Amino acid sequence: MTNTETVIQSDDQLLRINDVVNLTTLAKSCINLWVAQGRFPKPLSLSKTIKVWRMKEVRQWSEKMHAAENI
């Protein structure tokens, strides 16, 4: 996905790890660590090698993080 592409993002959209990295600016290793620590939403396993996150859960997590910064 490039910066010039317009993408419609619905809450039902499923995101691969690279999409989550782009949305959150977190590294893959950080996302995986935070999932293990319970600090980031757990992905859905579509197969042994394919994991995806729901857009809704990533957005909610992001909003929660931004709200905590503003307290």
Image: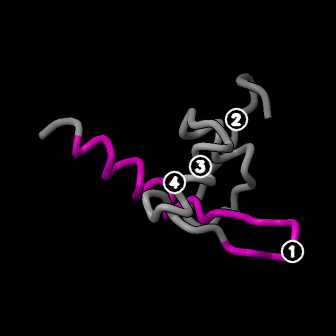
Residue drawn 40% across the image and 58% down it = 60
Specify the quadrant of the image occupied by residue 61.
bottom left
Label 2: how many Cα within 10 Å (few below 14, some 14–19, many 20+): few
| Sooner in the amino-acid sequence: mark 2 or mark 1 | 2
Q: Which residue is mark 2?
A: 6
| Sooner in the amino-acid sequence: mark 3 or mark 1 | 3
Identify which amino acid the numbered label 3 is placed on.
Ile
Tag 3 near tag 2, CB within 8 Å: no
| Sooner in the amino-acid sequence: mark 1 or mark 4 | 4
| Sooner in the amino-acid sequence: mark 4 or mark 2 | 2
Q: Is 2 rendered above or below residue 57? A: above
Tag 2 near tag 1, CB within 8 Å: no
Q: Is residue 47 left or right of residue 65?
A: right
Q: Nearer the viewer, mark 2 or mark 1?
A: 1
Split into 4 quadrants, where in the image is the C terminus?
top left
Q: Is residue 58 left or right of residue 47?
A: left
Percent coordinates x, y for residue 41 in the rendering: 51, 64
Percent coordinates x, y for residue 35 in the rendering: 55, 60
**Extreme-left residue of the structure:** 71
Tag 4 near tag 3, CB within 8 Å: yes
Residue 67 among those drawn in magenta:
yes
Give the magenta range. 44-68
Q: Is 36 rendered above or below residue 25? A: below
Identify which amino acid the numbered label 1 is placed on.
Lys
Distance from the alpha carbon under mark 4 to that under mark 2: 29 Å
Residue 48 among those drawn in magenta:
yes
Q: Identify which residue, 31 or 69, lies in the foreground.
A: 31
Q: Which residue is mark 4?
A: 34
Q: Which residue is mark 1?
A: 48
Split into 4 quadrants, where in the image is the N terminus?
top right
Q: Which residue is mark 3?
A: 31
Label 1: how many Cα within 10 Å (few below 14, some 14–19, many 20+): few
